[in-house]
Image (spheres, rainbow, N blue to C red):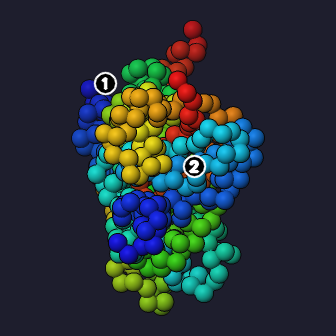
């Protein structure tokens, strides 16, 4: 453990260190902090990012400006249990050879999406005469999804090829704003098509992959009671690394430490701004390395005395 | 109705070759675009040409999707658009040999358009297109009957 951060207790293990590196390279942190500080209600709030592998990274400590009691903005990335995706994610920080594999895995996933939408269109078209028009909705939605997933597939093949022939082009693409925005639009279009084509298996593949075994909507709605309690525990142990879990429980029971942070609503505008900043990240991560939409839940948590 | 295609027939007999044609087009276009970066536009600055190359590729992909969609809807003349796309890819890639590109990538970018043309010309595909025309006529007959009374 040769890294300097380890000595000041910021990153307790290698995986957290890597997570911090990744987040800092993906998110425009100054812009994110500026968006949070623009809202008088949460100015100086701490920012905590929890990634898909449960690495908790404190991006910024709380400063008692908006209130004395700590307030934190929690950004939580949804888990992906699918093996190729995990694998692709795993190679993000590795050198070029493994990036080639990452691109190839991603290409496979997006091209599978294209196959599925063609199957949906074909079945819709052939069924139309017999079901007399009932399935033409599927065809129309499938058409958009086929367009989007074909573009993703094309993008994947071209990127894989370029990774062999001229990797600089891929780096250039990743740095371009229009490319990141286009990726978000394509992800959304193919996901909408998949959702509406009423093929439950397809839905499962796409949505369950992106979320914590819950539906996309549920993840976006935020964290539930149990998750909040767990999160509180994790946050308290970030605050005081010397605290063992037993000590934590005892002190929570005695009321010295709070059991659960209460969720408070972020003001809509701030939330939208944060989402905008994350949007680029989500699209980039989604289309470049996992081929599906990464979900990030945003919540503001503050400690109150119960 | 017995000579018409059922869904199961279609997926068992024609879907794989249909996908073969579609994906041959995807691969030809993607490889042609990727190779364009290392050959014709090797020395051009990315900021100037990159977006244009990719947009051209993306538009051709959308054209591919649309023509295959029309073929599925029973308009077999759109197959000529596919022929044009394969031929264009082939002609675009062939002269790249003078830039001495990556051997495997270059040969793949020649094989995919040829494979696409082969699939498009196969008897299975011709049969499928003929059946899809019948299905379209049936669909139109149903529609006019629904409108007229």
Asked whether A74 or B105 is in front, the reply is A74
- Residue B53 shows in this picture: no
Q: Does A57 appear above or below B52?
A: above
Please name the residue that numbered disc 1 is placed on: B1
Asked whether A136 or A155 is in front, the reply is A155
Quadrant in the picture for residue A86: bottom left
* Residue at point 52%, 15% (across, down): B145
Asked whether B121 or A105 is in front, the reply is A105
* Residue at point 54%, 62% (across, down): A24
Please name the residue that numbered disc 2 is placed on: A47
Q: Does A244 appear above or below B110?
A: above
Q: Does B86 appear above or below A187?
A: below
Specify the subunit that label 1 lies on.
Answer: B
Spatial distance from mark 2 to mark 1, Cα to Cα?
A: 65 Å
Taking A204 as reference, is A188 left or right?
Answer: right
Point out residue A300 in the picture as x, y percentages from the top left corner: 58, 37
Asked whether B37 or B131 is in front, the reply is B37
Q: Quadrant of the N terminus of chain A?
A: bottom left
């Amino acid at each position: 453990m040769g890294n300097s951060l380890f000595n000041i207790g910021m990153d307790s293990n290698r995986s957290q260190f890597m997570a911090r590196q990744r987040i800092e390279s993906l998110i425009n942190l100054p812009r994110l902090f500026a968006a949070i500080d623009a809202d008088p209600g949460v100015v100086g709030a701490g920012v905590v990012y929890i990634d898909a592998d449960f690495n908790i990274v404190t991006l910024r400590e709380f400063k008692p400006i908006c209130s004395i009691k700590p307030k934190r903005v929690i950004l939580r990335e949804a888990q992906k249990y699918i093996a190729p995706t995990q694998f692709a994610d795993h190679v993000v920080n590795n050198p070029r050879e493994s990036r080639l594999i990452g691109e190839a895995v991603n290409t496979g996933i997006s091209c599978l999406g294209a196959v599925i939408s063609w199957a949906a269109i074909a079945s819709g078209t052939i069924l139309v005469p017999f079901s007399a028009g009932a399935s033409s909705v599927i065809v129309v939605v499938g058409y958009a999804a086929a367009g989007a997933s074909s573009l993703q597939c094309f993008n994947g093949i071209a990127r894989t090829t370029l990774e062999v022939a001229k990797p600089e082009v891929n780096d250039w693409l990743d740095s371009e704003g229009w490319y990141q925005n286009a990726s978000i639009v394509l992800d959304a279009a193919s996901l909408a098509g998949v959702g509406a084509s009423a093929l439950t298996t397809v839905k499962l593949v796409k949505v369950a992959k992106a979320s914590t075994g819950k539906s996309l909507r549920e993840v976006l709605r935020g964290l539930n009671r149990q998750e909040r309690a767990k999160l509180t525990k994790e946050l308290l142990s970030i605050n005081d690394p010397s605290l063992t879990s037993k000590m934590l429980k005892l002190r929570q029971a005695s009321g010295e430490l709070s059991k659960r942070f209460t969720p408070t609503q972020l003001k809509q505008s701030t939330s939208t701004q944060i989402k905008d900043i994350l949007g680029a990240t989500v699209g980039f991560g989604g289309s470049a390395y996992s081929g599906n939409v990464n979900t990030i839940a945003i919540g503001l948590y503050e400690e109150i005395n119960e | 109705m017995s000579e018409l295609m059922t869904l199961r027939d279609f997926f068992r007999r024609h879907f794989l070759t249909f996908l073969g044609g579609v994906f041959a087009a995807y691969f030809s276009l993607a490889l042609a675009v990727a190779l364009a970066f290392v050959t014709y536009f090797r020395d051009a600055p990315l900021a100037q040409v990159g977006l244009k190359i990719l947009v051209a590729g993306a538009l051709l992909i959308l054209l591919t999707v649309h023509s295959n969609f029309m073929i599925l809807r029973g308009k077999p003349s759109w197959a000529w658009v596919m022929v044009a796309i394969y031929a264009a890819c082939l002609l675009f890639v062939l002269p790249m040999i003078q830039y001495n590109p990556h051997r495997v990538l270059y040969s793949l970018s020649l094989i995919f358009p040829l494979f696409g043309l082969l699939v498009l010309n196969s008897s299975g595909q011709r049969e499928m297109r003929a059946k899809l025309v019948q299905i379209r006529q049936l669909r139109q007959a149903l529609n006019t009957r629904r409108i007229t009374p």
